[in-house]
Image (spheres, helix red, strand yellow):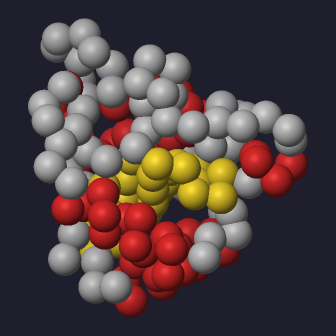
């Protein structure tokens, strides 16, 4: 059982995601925005983060991912750099833009399009939890 933090401002999406993850045996905590999510990271030390792209701003999820993976020594999130991040987004269905994990610009481990397909989503999460991640 892993502890998973969902950072998303949509209560219905949080509920759907929570149900998938708890049904797979994981413990789930949540935060409604990036600022609260970053506080939860420090307080709860999650094993994986599920992160929405658009919350209080159109790029809030990107900003949270960058804060968590910030490479400077001494960053307040230095100890959390290797937590896998799954980014949830509906952006691929609403714009022609395509995003994917990219270490410098968008340092996440996976993208999952909304609406989620529960079995595929849980398989992606479980796969990332089993991956040995090198220290960054």
Q: Quadrant of the N terminus?
A: bottom left
Judge by depth and name the residue closer to the eye, 69 or 118. Answer: 118
- Whether residue 12 appears in this view of the structure is yes
x, y percentage for residue 130? 20, 62
Residue at the far bottom: name it.
23
Which residue is at 37% across, 65% downward?
Answer: 125
Which residue is at 66% across, 74% downward?
Answer: 12
Question: In the figure, 52 relative to 95: above or below?
Answer: below
**Horizontal relation, residue 21 to residue 89: left or right:** left
**Horizontal relation, residue 2 to residue 87: left or right:** left
Which residue is at 51% across, 41% downward?
Answer: 34
Classify residue 135 by image quadrant: top left
Which residue is at 40% across, 73% downward?
Answer: 123
x, y percentage for residue 48? 31, 55
x, y percentage for residue 83? 26, 45
**Horizontal relation, residue 4 to residue 36: left or right:** left
Number of numbered callouts drawn? 0
- Whether residue 64 appears in this view of the structure is no
Question: In the figure, 121 relative to 88: above or below?
Answer: below
x, y percentage for residue 71? 27, 15
Q: Quadrant of the C terminus?
A: top left
């Amino acid at each position: 059982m892993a502890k998973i933090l969902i950072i998303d401002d949509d209560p219905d999406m949080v509920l759907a995601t929570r149900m998938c993850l708890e049904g797979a045996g994981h413990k789930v905590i949540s935060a409604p925005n990036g600022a609260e999510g970053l506080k939860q990271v420090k307080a709860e030390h999650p094993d994986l983060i599920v992160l929405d792209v658009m919350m209080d701003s159109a790029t809030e999820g990107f900003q949270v991912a960058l804060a968590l993976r910030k490479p400077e020594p001494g960053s307040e999130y230095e100890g959390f750099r290797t937590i896998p991040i799954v980014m949830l987004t509906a952006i691929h269905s609403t714009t022609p833009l395509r995003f994917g994990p990219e270490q410098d610009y968008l340092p996440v481990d996976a993208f999952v399009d909304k609406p989620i397909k529960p079995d595929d989503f849980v398989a992606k999460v479980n796969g990332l939890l089993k991956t040995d991640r090198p220290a960054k």
